Image (tube, coloured by chain):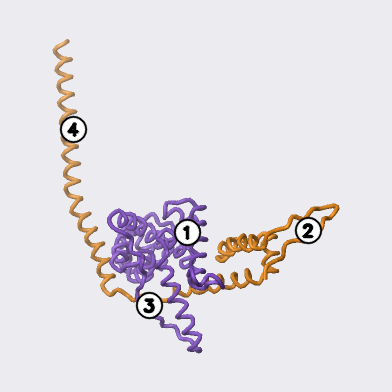
Chain colours: A purple, B orange
Amino acid sequence: MVALVERAKSGDREAFDRLVRVTHGDAYALALRLMGSTEDARDVVQEAYLRAYKGIGRFRGDAQFSTWLYRIVANCATTHLGRRQRHRHDHLGLHHDVIDTRPDHDPALQGDRAELRKRLDDAIGDLPVRLRSVVVLRDMYDLPHEAIAAELGISVTAAKVRLHRARRRLREQVLPMPGEESSA
Amino acid sequence: MTRRPSATAVDTTTISVPTDPRRDCESVSDALAAAAGGDHAYGPAQSAHLASCLRCRVEESRYRRLMAAMRSLRETPVLKDSRLEAQILLHLDRHDHRGARDVRPRLAAKVAAGAAAAAGLMAFTARHRRAARLAS
Protein backbone atom coordinates (compact mmCIF):
# COMPACT_ATOMS: atom_id res chain seq x y z
CA MET A 1 0.00 0.00 0.00
CA VAL A 2 2.78 2.44 0.97
CA ALA A 3 4.61 1.77 -2.30
CA LEU A 4 1.40 2.25 -4.27
CA VAL A 5 0.75 5.55 -2.52
CA GLU A 6 4.30 6.73 -3.27
CA ARG A 7 3.91 5.83 -6.95
CA ALA A 8 0.51 7.52 -7.09
CA LYS A 9 2.00 10.64 -5.48
CA SER A 10 4.57 10.82 -8.27
CA GLY A 11 1.76 10.88 -10.83
CA ASP A 12 1.45 7.18 -11.67
CA ARG A 13 -2.19 6.85 -12.72
CA GLU A 14 -2.01 3.06 -12.79
CA ALA A 15 -0.91 3.03 -9.14
CA PHE A 16 -3.83 5.27 -8.22
CA ASP A 17 -6.22 2.94 -10.06
CA ARG A 18 -4.90 0.06 -7.97
CA LEU A 19 -5.45 2.09 -4.81
CA VAL A 20 -9.05 2.60 -5.94
CA ARG A 21 -9.41 -1.14 -6.50
CA VAL A 22 -8.08 -1.93 -3.00
CA THR A 23 -9.91 0.74 -0.99
CA HIS A 24 -13.20 1.52 -2.74
CA GLY A 25 -15.19 -1.11 -0.80
CA ASP A 26 -14.41 0.50 2.57
CA ALA A 27 -14.91 4.00 1.22
CA TYR A 28 -18.31 2.99 -0.17
CA ALA A 29 -19.33 1.38 3.15
CA LEU A 30 -18.50 4.60 5.01
CA ALA A 31 -20.33 6.73 2.44
CA LEU A 32 -23.35 4.45 2.65
CA ARG A 33 -23.45 4.75 6.43
CA LEU A 34 -23.13 8.52 6.27
CA MET A 35 -25.57 9.08 3.41
CA GLY A 36 -28.15 6.34 3.93
CA SER A 37 -28.76 5.72 0.23
CA THR A 38 -26.78 3.76 -2.35
CA GLU A 39 -27.24 6.41 -5.02
CA ASP A 40 -25.88 9.23 -2.84
CA ALA A 41 -23.09 6.98 -1.52
CA ARG A 42 -21.98 6.26 -5.09
CA ASP A 43 -21.86 9.99 -5.93
CA VAL A 44 -19.94 10.76 -2.75
CA VAL A 45 -17.35 8.03 -3.38
CA GLN A 46 -16.75 9.16 -6.97
CA GLU A 47 -16.29 12.74 -5.84
CA ALA A 48 -14.04 11.64 -2.97
CA TYR A 49 -11.70 9.69 -5.27
CA LEU A 50 -11.52 12.61 -7.67
CA ARG A 51 -10.52 14.89 -4.78
CA ALA A 52 -8.02 12.31 -3.57
CA TYR A 53 -6.58 12.01 -7.09
CA LYS A 54 -6.15 15.76 -7.37
CA GLY A 55 -4.73 16.07 -3.86
CA ILE A 56 -2.59 12.94 -3.50
CA GLY A 57 0.55 15.07 -3.91
CA ARG A 58 -0.37 16.83 -0.67
CA PHE A 59 -0.80 13.55 1.25
CA ARG A 60 2.03 13.68 3.78
CA GLY A 61 1.86 10.07 4.84
CA ASP A 62 1.70 10.84 8.58
CA ALA A 63 -1.66 9.06 8.68
CA GLN A 64 -2.73 5.90 6.88
CA PHE A 65 -3.98 6.38 3.34
CA SER A 66 -7.33 4.89 4.37
CA THR A 67 -7.72 7.43 7.21
CA TRP A 68 -6.89 10.25 4.81
CA LEU A 69 -9.45 8.86 2.37
CA TYR A 70 -12.12 8.55 5.11
CA ARG A 71 -11.64 12.23 5.90
CA ILE A 72 -12.18 13.10 2.24
CA VAL A 73 -15.30 10.87 2.10
CA ALA A 74 -16.64 12.56 5.26
CA ASN A 75 -15.99 15.98 3.77
CA CYS A 76 -17.67 15.07 0.47
CA ALA A 77 -20.62 13.59 2.36
CA THR A 78 -21.02 16.81 4.35
CA THR A 79 -20.98 18.85 1.14
CA HIS A 80 -23.42 16.47 -0.53
CA LEU A 81 -25.78 16.44 2.47
CA GLY A 82 -25.77 20.23 2.59
CA ARG A 83 -26.64 20.33 -1.12
CA ARG A 84 -29.30 17.64 -0.71
CA GLN A 85 -30.96 19.35 2.25
CA ARG A 86 -31.33 22.48 0.20
CA HIS A 87 -33.21 20.51 -2.46
CA ARG A 88 -35.34 18.00 -0.61
CA HIS A 89 -36.15 16.53 2.78
CA ASP A 90 -33.55 14.28 4.31
CA HIS A 91 -34.15 10.58 3.94
CA LEU A 92 -33.01 8.99 7.17
CA GLY A 93 -33.47 5.32 6.38
CA LEU A 94 -30.34 3.22 6.33
CA HIS A 95 -31.80 -0.14 5.57
CA HIS A 96 -29.16 -1.57 3.29
CA ASP A 97 -28.41 -5.25 3.02
CA VAL A 98 -25.52 -6.63 4.98
CA ILE A 99 -23.64 -9.86 4.52
CA ASP A 100 -22.12 -11.42 7.59
CA THR A 101 -19.39 -13.82 6.53
CA ARG A 102 -17.85 -14.35 9.96
CA PRO A 103 -18.13 -17.82 11.39
CA ASP A 104 -19.22 -18.34 14.99
CA HIS A 105 -19.34 -21.54 16.99
CA ASP A 106 -22.48 -20.67 18.91
CA PRO A 107 -25.47 -20.16 16.58
CA ALA A 108 -27.61 -18.68 19.36
CA LEU A 109 -24.91 -16.17 20.29
CA GLN A 110 -24.35 -15.42 16.64
CA GLY A 111 -28.09 -14.83 16.28
CA ASP A 112 -28.08 -12.46 19.27
CA ARG A 113 -25.10 -10.54 17.91
CA ALA A 114 -26.59 -10.37 14.43
CA GLU A 115 -29.86 -9.14 15.92
CA LEU A 116 -28.01 -6.51 17.98
CA ARG A 117 -26.07 -5.37 14.90
CA LYS A 118 -29.28 -5.16 12.89
CA ARG A 119 -31.00 -3.07 15.57
CA LEU A 120 -27.93 -0.86 15.88
CA ASP A 121 -27.71 -0.44 12.12
CA ASP A 122 -31.36 0.64 12.03
CA ALA A 123 -30.88 2.97 15.01
CA ILE A 124 -27.86 4.62 13.36
CA GLY A 125 -29.98 5.12 10.25
CA ASP A 126 -32.68 6.78 12.35
CA LEU A 127 -30.27 9.29 13.89
CA PRO A 128 -30.33 12.83 12.55
CA VAL A 129 -27.49 13.32 10.06
CA ARG A 130 -25.59 15.73 12.37
CA LEU A 131 -25.40 13.07 15.09
CA ARG A 132 -24.96 10.10 12.76
CA SER A 133 -21.90 11.54 10.98
CA VAL A 134 -20.03 12.09 14.23
CA VAL A 135 -20.78 8.72 15.83
CA VAL A 136 -19.99 6.78 12.64
CA LEU A 137 -16.68 8.58 12.09
CA ARG A 138 -15.58 8.33 15.73
CA ASP A 139 -16.91 5.01 17.00
CA MET A 140 -16.81 2.98 13.80
CA TYR A 141 -13.90 4.51 11.90
CA ASP A 142 -11.76 5.79 14.82
CA LEU A 143 -11.20 9.26 13.38
CA PRO A 144 -9.84 11.71 15.98
CA HIS A 145 -12.19 14.40 17.31
CA GLU A 146 -10.09 17.11 15.68
CA ALA A 147 -10.30 15.49 12.24
CA ILE A 148 -14.05 14.98 12.55
CA ALA A 149 -14.58 18.59 13.61
CA ALA A 150 -12.44 19.82 10.71
CA GLU A 151 -14.21 17.73 8.07
CA LEU A 152 -17.70 18.57 9.35
CA GLY A 153 -16.87 22.27 9.78
CA ILE A 154 -17.70 22.37 13.51
CA SER A 155 -15.73 22.92 16.71
CA VAL A 156 -14.16 20.04 18.62
CA THR A 157 -16.47 20.78 21.56
CA ALA A 158 -19.52 20.62 19.30
CA ALA A 159 -18.27 17.34 17.82
CA LYS A 160 -17.93 15.84 21.31
CA VAL A 161 -21.35 17.05 22.42
CA ARG A 162 -22.92 15.52 19.30
CA LEU A 163 -21.01 12.29 19.86
CA HIS A 164 -22.20 11.87 23.44
CA ARG A 165 -25.77 12.71 22.44
CA ALA A 166 -25.63 10.17 19.62
CA ARG A 167 -24.22 7.42 21.86
CA ARG A 168 -26.91 8.08 24.44
CA ARG A 169 -29.68 7.89 21.85
CA LEU A 170 -28.29 4.68 20.41
CA ARG A 171 -27.93 3.11 23.84
CA GLU A 172 -31.49 4.11 24.78
CA GLN A 173 -32.86 2.72 21.53
CA VAL A 174 -30.80 -0.46 21.17
CA LEU A 175 -30.11 -1.42 24.79
CA PRO A 176 -32.73 0.41 26.87
CA MET A 177 -32.66 0.45 30.64
CA PRO A 178 -35.80 -0.55 32.56
CA GLY A 179 -38.27 2.27 32.17
CA GLU A 180 -36.80 3.43 28.86
CA GLU A 181 -38.43 0.74 26.72
CA SER A 182 -41.60 2.72 26.03
CA SER A 183 -39.66 5.64 24.59
CA ALA A 184 -37.34 3.40 22.56
CA MET B 1 -29.77 0.67 43.75
CA THR B 2 -28.67 4.31 44.07
CA ARG B 3 -26.64 5.88 46.77
CA ARG B 4 -28.82 7.12 49.54
CA PRO B 5 -28.57 10.80 50.47
CA SER B 6 -25.95 11.52 53.08
CA ALA B 7 -27.22 11.49 56.57
CA THR B 8 -28.36 14.84 57.78
CA ALA B 9 -26.58 14.44 61.09
CA VAL B 10 -24.60 17.58 61.68
CA ASP B 11 -20.91 17.15 62.15
CA THR B 12 -19.15 19.80 64.13
CA THR B 13 -16.32 20.12 61.59
CA THR B 14 -18.12 19.62 58.25
CA ILE B 15 -21.68 20.01 57.19
CA SER B 16 -22.70 17.30 54.73
CA VAL B 17 -25.24 18.54 52.21
CA PRO B 18 -27.78 15.86 51.29
CA THR B 19 -27.50 14.91 47.60
CA ASP B 20 -30.28 13.71 45.36
CA PRO B 21 -29.36 10.16 44.20
CA ARG B 22 -31.32 10.60 40.97
CA ARG B 23 -29.26 13.67 40.17
CA ASP B 24 -26.11 11.61 40.81
CA CYS B 25 -27.35 8.99 38.35
CA GLU B 26 -28.14 11.67 35.75
CA SER B 27 -24.73 13.25 36.15
CA VAL B 28 -23.00 9.88 35.84
CA SER B 29 -25.19 8.96 32.87
CA ASP B 30 -23.75 11.90 30.90
CA ALA B 31 -20.26 10.79 31.87
CA LEU B 32 -21.01 7.20 30.82
CA ALA B 33 -21.78 8.30 27.26
CA ALA B 34 -18.55 10.32 27.19
CA ALA B 35 -16.43 7.57 28.73
CA ALA B 36 -17.81 4.81 26.49
CA GLY B 37 -15.21 5.52 23.81
CA GLY B 38 -12.32 5.47 26.28
CA ASP B 39 -11.39 9.13 25.86
CA HIS B 40 -12.91 10.42 29.08
CA ALA B 41 -12.09 9.50 32.68
CA TYR B 42 -14.56 9.58 35.55
CA GLY B 43 -14.09 12.12 38.31
CA PRO B 44 -13.75 10.91 41.93
CA ALA B 45 -17.43 11.63 42.72
CA GLN B 46 -18.58 9.77 39.59
CA SER B 47 -16.34 6.79 40.39
CA ALA B 48 -17.70 6.69 43.93
CA HIS B 49 -21.27 6.76 42.66
CA LEU B 50 -20.57 4.04 40.10
CA ALA B 51 -19.09 1.82 42.79
CA SER B 52 -22.28 1.99 44.80
CA CYS B 53 -25.01 2.21 42.13
CA LEU B 54 -26.05 -1.01 40.43
CA ARG B 55 -28.25 0.75 37.86
CA CYS B 56 -25.38 2.93 36.65
CA ARG B 57 -23.06 -0.08 36.47
CA VAL B 58 -25.64 -1.88 34.30
CA GLU B 59 -25.87 1.20 32.10
CA GLU B 60 -22.07 1.28 31.84
CA SER B 61 -22.00 -2.37 30.73
CA ARG B 62 -24.65 -1.60 28.08
CA TYR B 63 -22.45 1.17 26.71
CA ARG B 64 -19.60 -1.36 26.51
CA ARG B 65 -21.82 -3.74 24.53
CA LEU B 66 -22.91 -0.88 22.29
CA MET B 67 -19.33 0.11 21.52
CA ALA B 68 -18.37 -3.49 20.75
CA ALA B 69 -21.37 -3.77 18.42
CA MET B 70 -20.36 -0.51 16.71
CA ARG B 71 -16.88 -1.86 16.04
CA SER B 72 -18.21 -5.17 14.74
CA LEU B 73 -20.65 -3.29 12.51
CA ARG B 74 -17.71 -1.70 10.74
CA GLU B 75 -16.34 -5.16 9.96
CA THR B 76 -19.69 -6.29 8.59
CA PRO B 77 -19.29 -5.76 4.87
CA VAL B 78 -22.04 -4.00 2.99
CA LEU B 79 -23.22 -5.45 -0.31
CA LYS B 80 -20.68 -4.53 -2.94
CA ASP B 81 -21.68 -2.33 -5.83
CA SER B 82 -20.15 -4.19 -8.77
CA ARG B 83 -20.21 -1.16 -11.07
CA LEU B 84 -18.70 1.30 -8.62
CA GLU B 85 -15.02 0.65 -9.37
CA ALA B 86 -15.56 1.15 -13.10
CA GLN B 87 -17.57 4.31 -12.43
CA ILE B 88 -14.83 5.78 -10.24
CA LEU B 89 -12.15 5.05 -12.84
CA LEU B 90 -14.33 6.52 -15.60
CA HIS B 91 -14.85 9.64 -13.49
CA LEU B 92 -11.06 9.98 -13.15
CA ASP B 93 -10.59 9.40 -16.90
CA ARG B 94 -13.05 12.17 -17.70
CA HIS B 95 -11.14 14.49 -15.40
CA ASP B 96 -7.82 13.57 -17.08
CA HIS B 97 -9.23 14.10 -20.58
CA ARG B 98 -10.87 17.36 -19.64
CA GLY B 99 -7.56 18.46 -18.17
CA ALA B 100 -5.72 17.55 -21.38
CA ARG B 101 -8.32 19.36 -23.51
CA ASP B 102 -8.12 22.42 -21.31
CA VAL B 103 -4.33 22.63 -21.54
CA ARG B 104 -4.23 23.58 -25.28
CA PRO B 105 -6.55 26.63 -25.15
CA ARG B 106 -4.86 27.77 -21.95
CA LEU B 107 -1.41 27.48 -23.56
CA ALA B 108 -2.59 29.27 -26.73
CA ALA B 109 -4.04 32.10 -24.65
CA LYS B 110 -0.78 32.46 -22.75
CA VAL B 111 1.28 32.56 -25.99
CA ALA B 112 -1.08 35.17 -27.51
CA ALA B 113 -0.93 37.29 -24.37
CA GLY B 114 2.86 37.07 -24.36
CA ALA B 115 3.09 38.05 -28.03
CA ALA B 116 0.75 40.99 -27.51
CA ALA B 117 2.79 42.19 -24.53
CA ALA B 118 6.04 41.91 -26.52
CA ALA B 119 4.53 43.82 -29.47
CA GLY B 120 3.26 46.54 -27.15
CA LEU B 121 6.67 46.89 -25.53
CA MET B 122 8.39 47.14 -28.93
CA ALA B 123 5.93 49.80 -30.13
CA PHE B 124 6.37 51.78 -26.91
CA THR B 125 10.16 51.65 -27.17
CA ALA B 126 10.13 52.68 -30.86
CA ARG B 127 7.83 55.64 -30.14
CA HIS B 128 10.02 56.71 -27.22
CA ARG B 129 13.17 56.59 -29.38
CA ARG B 130 11.47 58.53 -32.19
CA ALA B 131 10.36 61.21 -29.74
CA ALA B 132 13.87 61.46 -28.33
CA ARG B 133 15.37 61.75 -31.83
CA LEU B 134 12.93 64.53 -32.83
CA ALA B 135 13.65 66.41 -29.63
CA SER B 136 17.40 66.39 -30.30
Task: Judge left or right: residue A97 versus residue A149.
Answer: left
Q: Secondary structure at mark 3?
A: loop
- The disc, 3 or 1, on the residue closer to the chain's N-terminal end is 1
**Mark-to-mark CA distance, 4 and 2:** 95 Å
The chain ID associated with circle 2 is B
Same subunit, labels 3 and 2: the answer reads no
Q: Amino acid at mark 2?
A: Thr
Same subunit, labels 4 and 1: the answer reads no
Q: Please rate how many residues cluster around mark 1, counting C-alpha atoms within 10 Å: few if below 14, some from 14 to 19, many from 20.
A: few
Question: For the residues carrying marks 2 and 1, which lies nearer the camera in this image?
Answer: 2
Question: For the residues carrying marks 3 and 4, which lies nearer the camera in this image?
Answer: 3
Where is B68 relative to A58, above or below? below
Q: Looking at the image, do the residues carrying marks 3 and 1 touch, with CB atoms under 8 Å apart?
A: no
Task: Judge left or right: residue B129 versus residue A182.
Answer: left
Task: Judge left or right: residue A155 versus residue A85.
Answer: right
Q: Residue B8: which disc?
A: 2
Q: Which residue is mark 3?
A: A98
Image coords of residue B56 (percent x, y)? 63, 68
**Mark-to-mark CA distance, 2 and 1:** 58 Å
Q: Which residue is mark 1?
A: A62
Question: For the residues carrying marks 3 and 2, which lies nearer the camera in this image?
Answer: 2
Q: Amino acid at mark 1?
A: Asp
Q: Please rate how many residues cluster around mark 4, counting C-alpha atoms within 10 Å: few if below 14, some from 14 to 19, many from 20.
A: few
Q: Residue B118: which disc?
A: 4
Q: Please rate how many residues cluster around mark 3, counting C-alpha atoms within 10 Å: few if below 14, some from 14 to 19, many from 20.
A: some
Q: Residue at x 58, y 61 (%)?
A: B30
The chain ID associated with circle 3 is A
Q: Residue at x 75, y 61 (%)?
A: B6
Q: Amino acid at mark 3?
A: Val
Q: Looking at the image, do the residues carrying marks 3 and 4 touch, with CB atoms under 8 Å apart?
A: no
